[in-house]
Image (cartoon, rainbow, N blue to C red):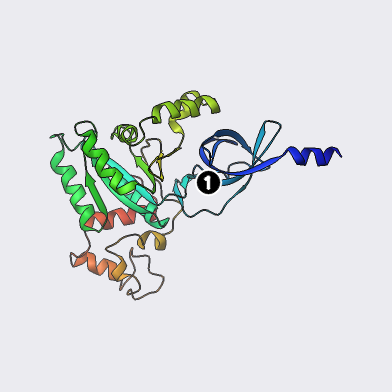
Amino acid sequence: MRSAARSATRAEFRARVVAGFGRRSLVQDERGHVWEATRRGRKGDVVVGDQVLVSESAGQVSIEAIEPRTTLLFRADAFRSKALASDVDLAIIVFASRPQPNRWFIWKALVAASAAGIEALVLRNKCDLEEGAAEADAMLRQIAELGWRTLAVSAKAQPETTRSALMRLISGRNSLLVGQSGMGKSTLLNLLVPDARARTQEYSERLNLGRQTTTATRWFPLPEGGAVVDTPGFREFGLAHLGPTEIAATFPEFRPLLGKCRFLDCRHLAEPGCAIREALEAGRVAADRYDFFRSCTSGTVR
């Protein structure tokens, strides 16, 4: 009788993970209500963006199961992999001319997004700044020539124009903002999600994160449909979770050459008859891009 009574009061529903830390997550149901939930039985397998099956009984909320993910974006170093978010279909990689951007960070984020099957947009912010403008323009132009979508904006100087341009691209989509610290990512987030600061504070208080909120990923549903996912600024975007073959497949300039090397298991480093190295020598592959590839496959950090 007691067991039957407990099951009668137990409610199950589906929700989206909008923030998390350790075994504790905040999940938002279809009505917009946010619950604090604990993963039942396991630790560390829940990611922001996950759609989950949740049970609620006597005020206790538990995540029972994770529904199949459409995508999962990782960054990883030699010691561990970090899942940034799931169910994202657009990665917006933000950089600016100041502070001086790390070109390889941008390229690594593009590799990670491509390997995860996620479309990428490289966004140059602070385009009103004259300092470093020529270098930033050249970076954006090279990325565009390789086939990725690009956009130049100034979130502070032209907020309405910036918001309008971005909303045309992200409305109805689940978009993730990623970039190094100081590139204006928070300004962009506040343009797209006007109450983001208030919700960030609420999430932090609910999870009792304190200062650790700066290391947390957060999911913000948009009234227009879709969502914006904010990630913390970090210095390095590691690719240790990807092998050389997977990395090579994400290079647009490599794709026409893959499968044309003398050896099927060619790693495109020192093997004879390598089609990619021949293209490099002929000037059809840029030297800086090949150096970047070698660094990624050898684990060098820059």
Left or right position of 238 against 121: right
Answer yes or no: is residue 104 visible: no
**Which residue lies at the image location 82% right of the left edge and 42% below the top edge?**
4
The reply to whether residue 224 is visible in this rendering is: yes
Quarter of the figure that contains the C terminus: top left
Viewer-nearest residue: 217 or 44:
217
Q: Is residue 79 left or right of residue 62?
A: left
Decide if residue 191 is on the left or right side of residue 195.
left
Q: Residue furthest right?
A: 1
Quadrant for the N terminus in the image: top right
- Tally of numbered discs: 1
Image vertical order of residue 142 relative to residue 5, above or below = below
Could you tell me which residue is drawn at 39 percent across and 50 percent down? 299
Picture layout, residue 297 above or below residue 256: above
Q: Quadrant of residue 260?
A: bottom left
Residue 177 left/right relative to 134: right
Which residue is labeled 1 in the image? 50
Position of residue 266 measured from the top left corner of the image (x, y, whole percent)? 38, 69
Residue 125 to residue 70: above or below: above
Can you give x and y, in whole percent of width and height, for residue 222 in the image?
A: 40, 40
The kind of residue tagged 1 is: Asp
Q: Dot 1: what SS?
A: loop
Residue 54: x and y, percent?
63, 42
Q: Nearer the viewer, residue 156 or 111?
A: 156
- Density class for disc 1 (Cα within 10 Å; few <14, some 14-19, many ≥20) is many
Q: Give percent across and percent down for residue 33.
A: 54, 34
